[in-house]
Structure formats: structure tokens, C-alpha cells
Image: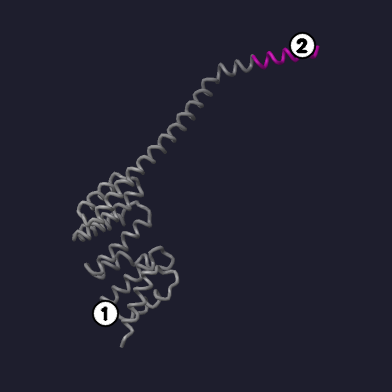
Amino acid sequence: MADIFSEVDEEVRKDRSLELWAKYGKYVIGGAVVIIAATAGVVAWQKHQLSQARDNGAIFENASRLATEQKFDESAATFGELSVSGTEGYKALSTLRQASALIAAGKGADAIVLYDELAGSAADNEFKNAARIFAGYYLIDNGTTAEVRDRVSSLASSGDLWSANAQELLALADLKDGKKDAALTTLKALAEDAAAPAGVKARSEQLVEILSVK
């Protein structure tokens, strides 16, 4: 008797399963199709990004080669194209390199425009702050101290990636304005700062030695 009831229960379960499948099966299939399509889309997008990264890398390398060959106008133009069509990381980096090539080509004013545009863009802070610092280094010799301070003062606080460079530029601005004591104080601190980049420390030590001569 138990076997009969078991068979009946099995048949009921089968009928119920068929009924549920008839009612909801299309949604299960539809969901599976969506998942497969989404997965395929992600894979295709990853392949596209990889291909685009290779293309961007080749263009960037070519622009760098042109700069090495001192074909600065051509280099700037190539970096400029990549700054528009490249992936996000390449856009910002190419803008910095384009500005550098423009400076080498004697077009500093155009470079400052690019630096300022990048600094005010939605790029990562590392790129934006780099643009401010590079603009400051150009302007310390080719602009006013006010222009330098305007771009780098906010980066001088300790702990910022570019703080040592910003402090160096502010010290140079003070020196240019005739504020020797203020410049010397900042430069001494940089020369003793273990976290400062080697180049900044070396330049600071040299200037401290020169400025300390009575």
C-alpha cells in the first residue's frame, strides 16, 4: 500500500513540476539568456579595452619617440590626439606629455592652458595636482610668483604626494620676491625631510649652502 501512495505522490510532484514549468519556465530561460548575454558582453568589453589599451600604448610610444627625436610639434600633436581619443588614464597622462612637448617647442603659454584645463578637469587628483606642479615649475621662470602660489599653495601641506615640490616652488617664489629668510627656512626643512624626493632634497641642500654664505 505504501508503494502505491509513493507512486501517487511522485506523479503529483511530476504534474506539479510540469505545471510550474509551463507557468514559469519561460522566465527561467529568459533569465538564463540575460545572464549569458551579460557575461558575453563583459568578456567582449574586456577584450575591447585590452585592444584599445594596446593601441593607446603604441600611439603613446610613438609620441614619446618623436619627443626624444626633438620633433616637439609632432610629438605634441600626437599626444594631443591621444588626450582626446585615449582611455581615461592615457588622456590625462597624454595631456601632461603634450604640455611638456609644447614647452620644449617654445609654446609655454599653450602648455599652461593645458595644465590649467587638466587641473580643473574630472581627472584623478594625482594628474590634476601634477598639472599644477608642472605649471608652477614653468611659471617660476616664465610667470609671476602670484601665478605660482595660486597653483601650488594648496598642495604644500605635509602628506600630500606633491607637498615637497609645492614647498620648493613656494620657497623659490619667496626667493624671487626677495624674502630670503622665509625661503631659507623652507629649504632647510626640505633638506632635512627624509620623505622628500631625492631631487628636491639635493636642490634644497645646494640652495641652503648658497644662501647661507654671508
Task: Tell me the kind of residue under disc 2.
Answer: Ile
Q: Determine whether 208 is above or below 55 in the image.
A: below
- Residue 69 position, x and y percent, is 23, 55
Verify whether residue 11 appears in magenta: yes
Residue at the spot of label 1: 178
Q: Residue drawn 30% across and 73% down?
A: 172
Q: Determine whether 127 is above or below 198 in the image.
A: above
Q: Secondary structure at mark 1?
A: loop
- Residue 60 position, x and y percent, is 30, 49
- Spatial distance from mark 2 to mark 1, Cα to Cα? 106 Å
Task: Tell me the kind of residue under disc 1.
Answer: Gly
- Residue 20 position, x and y percent, is 59, 18
Image quarter (top left, top right, bottom left or bottom right) of the N terminus: top right
Residue at the spot of label 2: 4
Q: Residue drawn 44% across and 69% down?
A: 195
Q: Determine whether 41 is above or below 80 in the image.
A: above
Q: What color scheme is it? A: one colour
Q: Secondary structure at mark 2?
A: helix
Which residue ends up furthest to the front in the rendered image? 69
Q: Which residues are magenta?
A: 1-14
Of residues 57 and 17, the one nearer the viewer is 57
Which residue ends up furthest to the bottom in the rendered image? 214
Verify whether residue 29 appears in magenta: no
Quadrant of residue 167 within the rendered picture = bottom left
Dot label at residue 192: none
